[in-house]
Image (tube, rainbow, N blue to C red):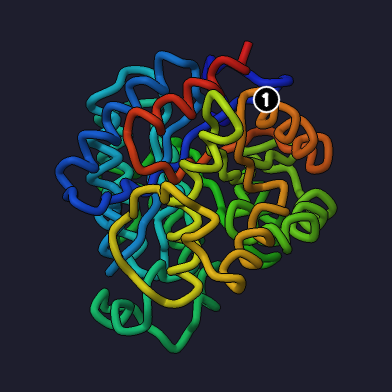
């Protein structure tokens, strides 16, 4: 199931991507409380789905046990679709993922999405700790995907069967930040979600590949694309840019290879960053997939992004330190939906 009864903006639904960020001065327990609170608000506000992303060995991200958090969110909500954005399949045995998501689907029927990526979501040392086979570098992802999909098929003669999992119709999405997953999703006739919120340079190329090579399947009759967008919205442009300094710090730290908890916004953004950092931030904000501003600014830029990409759905990530401000950012987006 691609869409629920979500509200729409210019004919398309909005969804939410959550990394369960751990704020400086806080902990994972509070992060999970914030996640559940946001998911409940998102359900009332008419968002289509709520996805959580798998990351490891990151002090500021609490979503490492992704399937457990998905179950926690699904159990705290009633109608919104909940899923992974995504599960990094090379980190896991396909059978384990089939059983985990089969269990989730049995608990919350018709509400679970399985989004899959082929990156480790971690550094090399952590990948070793996950007992992942490193020599493949994700090259065997198509084979892993085929094995995973086979466990959802009804096959009473199979020697290994996923219970729960077998016979369940769980939507599988392929996630990517390059052309590899775009081509594979097209070949298999699966919905595709592109990480334009952190890899915008490859966006148009990936979209072209997916649309040109798409083959209809029993899962999907025509292409369906969901794009990631960073949106930090507030009641004024100045307030939004102030809030965005938390995301800017995270972005710069990732570039430097520095890990840590999510930092509060800077009172004086002009004095907070050196000239090199300011240039990197300007580059980040030039891309249409990072949108910061008031209602009017965000609405105008989202309309331009949709006009350029023809996306079927947007999944919004909002790196905002204070929970109340993050709620307000998503509330502003909800007010744009009919």
Furthest toward the bottom, the residue is 135
Seen from the viewer's position, the closer of residues 140 and 56 is 56
Label 1 packing within 10 angstroms: few (<14), some (14-19), many (20+) = some
Image label count:
1
For the residue labelled by badge 1, is the local secondary structure a helix, a strand or a loop?
strand
Residue 224, by quadrant, is top right
The quarter of the image holding the C terminus is top right
Seen from the viewer's position, the closer of residues 158 and 185 is 185
At horizontal 60% and vertical 40% (from top left) the residue drawn is 292
Looking at the image, is 104 positioned above or below residue 120?
above
- Residue 254, percent across and down? 45, 69
Q: Is residue 230 visible?
A: yes
Tell me the residue that label 1 is attached to.
12
Looking at the image, is 104 positioned above or below residue 182?
above
Residue 110, by quadrant, is top left
At horizontal 50% and vertical 60% (from top left) the residue drawn is 271
Q: Is residue 154 visible?
A: no
At horizontal 15% and vertical 44% (from top left) the residue drawn is 29
Looking at the image, is 220 positioned above or below residue 275?
above
Looking at the image, is 321 positioned above or below residue 255?
above
Furthest toward the top, the residue is 338
- Residue 204, percent across and down? 79, 55
At horizontal 71% and vertical 57% (from top left) the residue drawn is 187
- Residue 145, percent across and down? 49, 61
- Residue 308, percent across and down? 83, 42
Seen from the viewer's position, the closer of residues 206 and 9 is 9
């Amino acid at each position: 199931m691609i869409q629920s009864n979500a509200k729409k903006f210019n004919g398309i639904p909005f969804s939410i991507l959550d990394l369960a960020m751990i704020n400086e001065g806080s902990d994972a327990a509070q992060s999970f409380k914030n996640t559940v609170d946001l998911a409940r608000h998102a359900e009332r506000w008419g968002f289509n789905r709520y996805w959580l992303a798998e990351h490891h060995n990151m002090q500021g991200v609490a979503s490492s046990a992704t399937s457990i958090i998905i179950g926690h969110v699904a159990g705290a909500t009633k109608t919104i679709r909940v899923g992974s954005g995504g599960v990094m399949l090379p980190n896991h045995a396909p059978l384990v993922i089939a059983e985990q998501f089969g269990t989730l689907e049995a608990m919350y029927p018709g509400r679970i999405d399985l989004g899959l990526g082929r990156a480790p979501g971690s550094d090399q040392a952590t990948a070793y700790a996950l007992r992942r086979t490193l020599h493949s570098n994700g090259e065997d992802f198509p084979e892993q995907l085929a094995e995973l999909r086979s466990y959802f098929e009804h096959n009473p003669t199979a020697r290994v069967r996923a219970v729960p999992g077998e016979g369940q119709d769980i939507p599988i999405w392929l996630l990517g930040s390059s052309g590899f997953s775009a081509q594979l999703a097209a070949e298999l006739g699966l919905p595709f979600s592109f990480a334009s919120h952190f890899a915008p340079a490859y966006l148009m190329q990936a979209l072209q590949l997916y649309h040109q090579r798409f083959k209809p399947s029993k899962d999907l009759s025509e292409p369906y694309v969901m794009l990631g967008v960073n949106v930090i919205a507030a009641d004024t442009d100045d307030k939004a840019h102030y809030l965005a300094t938390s995301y800017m710090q995270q972005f710069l730290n990732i570039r430097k290879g520095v890990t840590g908890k999510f930092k509060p916004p800077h009172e004086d953004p002009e004095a907070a960053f050196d000239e090199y950092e300011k240039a990197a931030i300007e580059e980040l904000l030039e891309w249409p997939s990072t949108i910061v501003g008031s209602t009017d600014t965000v609405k105008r830029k989202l309309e331009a992004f949709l006009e350029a990409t023809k996306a079927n759905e947007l999944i919004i990530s909002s790196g905002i330190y204070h929970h109340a401000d993050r709620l307000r950012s998503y509330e502003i987006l909800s007010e744009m939906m009919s």
